[in-house]
Image (cartoon, grey):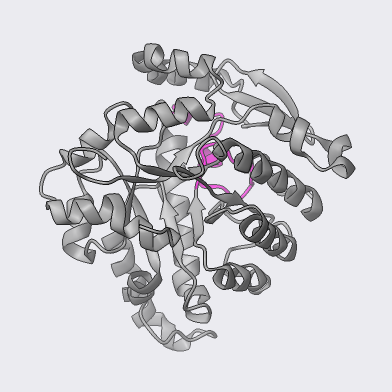
Amino acid sequence: MKNGFKVIDSDLHVIEDGTVYETYLAPEFRNRMPEFLGIGPTNFPHWRVEGQVIPPWAAAEEVVGPQKFMDSPTEDIYAPIRARGYDAQSALAAMDVEGIDVSVVFRTFAHMVVSIDSLPGDLATAYCAAFNDWLVDYCAADPARLKPAAIVSLHDPELAAAEARRSVEDKGHVGVVLLPMPVAGRNVHAPECDVLWREVERLGVPLLFHGTSGGASLDYASNRFRDHPNFRTLNHAAAFPMELMLAMGSMLVGGVCERFPKLKVGFLEGNCGWLPWWLHRLDDQWKKYGGGEAFRLSALPSEYFKRQCWIATDVDEELVRVVIDEIGDDNIVMSTDYPHADGPYPHATEEFLGLPGISDQSKRKILWDNCIRLYGLRP
């Protein structure tokens, strides 16, 4: 609790290590195990996966300077956390500092590993399963406060559905996380993905889109900036919101929310200030073109969003007040982004509570009530 407000972090993060695959990868795939390369010059752990370095820029000179510049102000804060290997106890201690009661725990690098378009479906699913099992053991440090969210990939939607089922029913994950960009040309509203949406809807957990700055997918917004000046700033600025916008368009205009009206969908860690304009744009374009589209919608895109979608605000995002004015406060949750150094730990919840133009009633919804509904957690 912070200043009288109960707090749920909608997507607190882990920093994975070599044990994810060395210990948890199924035996039949160990001959294709990602090779852990340790901490690279950009201050991130990295792997070699099927001949590719993940994240792709882990040793890139053009990223080293910007990353060191960004990391340096908080080096003293994160040094002891890094020395502990970003373990669960250090995360719980950070939650205590921030006044966070419960966190839903997300990957950082494990989804980068399965962002390679050419991975066979069974191998990509095995990589996901290894992380999902590792994360359950991580969260076992305090299951009441740490809630795991499973990853899947769209390399094989049927296998992804099976992994979602295993993770939720057998392992206790509270959500299913997906990268927002296409995989091998497959968009999220492709018909073959319905098997996954149907299963997630049946499981009653949310489908959660969360981007990454280290994707290897060829159809990925920020890779167009590779090997050009100021890549890291453009990469980080563009990847998260742009890919979420496009995934949201696929889910709303592509008919997924129409076909699966009980599916809960979250769009996390890509800001929310763009949401009113994007929904207005989607509504406007549907009114102009939708009558001639092959798949008809029974409602406007914005109506689907308000019915079954949530979006996360960063704690320092002043434009959230505009979103509340335009869309309301029922569909917004909060993320501190711990332990990523571009987040404002140890003052994240303080920053959110200090945002101007937001009522205490709205803050309570965003910090607690809306996340309870999104994840189906018991109050």
In the displayed structure, does residue 319 sit left or right of residue 102? Answer: left
Q: What stretch is highlighted in magenta?
A: 211-232
User: Considering the image in quadrants, where does the N terminus appear?
Assistant: top left
Q: Nearer the viewer, residue 238 or 141?
A: 141
Q: How many marks?
A: 0
Magenta highlight: main SS: loop
When the figure is inspected, residue 331 is found, relative to residue 29, above or below; the finding is below
Residue positioned 59% across, 21% down in the render: 60
When the figure is inspected, residue 167 is found, relative to residue 335, above or below; the finding is below
Q: Does the magenta stretch include residue 213?
A: yes
Q: Which of 199 and 192 is in front in this view?
A: 199
- Residue 177 location (% of width, % of height): 55, 53
- Residue 118 location (% of width, % of height): 76, 48
In the displayed structure, does residue 300 sit left or right of residue 45? Answer: left
Residue positioned 27% across, 46% down in the render: 6
- Residue 284 location (% of width, % of height): 31, 75
Residue positioned 20% across, 59% down in the render: 324
In the rendered image, which quarter is residue 340 located in?
top left
Q: Nearer the viewer, residue 89 or 364?
A: 89
In the displayed structure, does residue 104 sit left or right of residue 348? Answer: right
When the figure is inspected, residue 10 is found, relative to residue 60, above or below; the finding is below
- Residue 364 location (% of width, % of height): 22, 53
Q: Does the magenta stretch include residue 280?
A: no
User: Considering the image in quadrants, where does the C terminus appear?
Assistant: bottom left
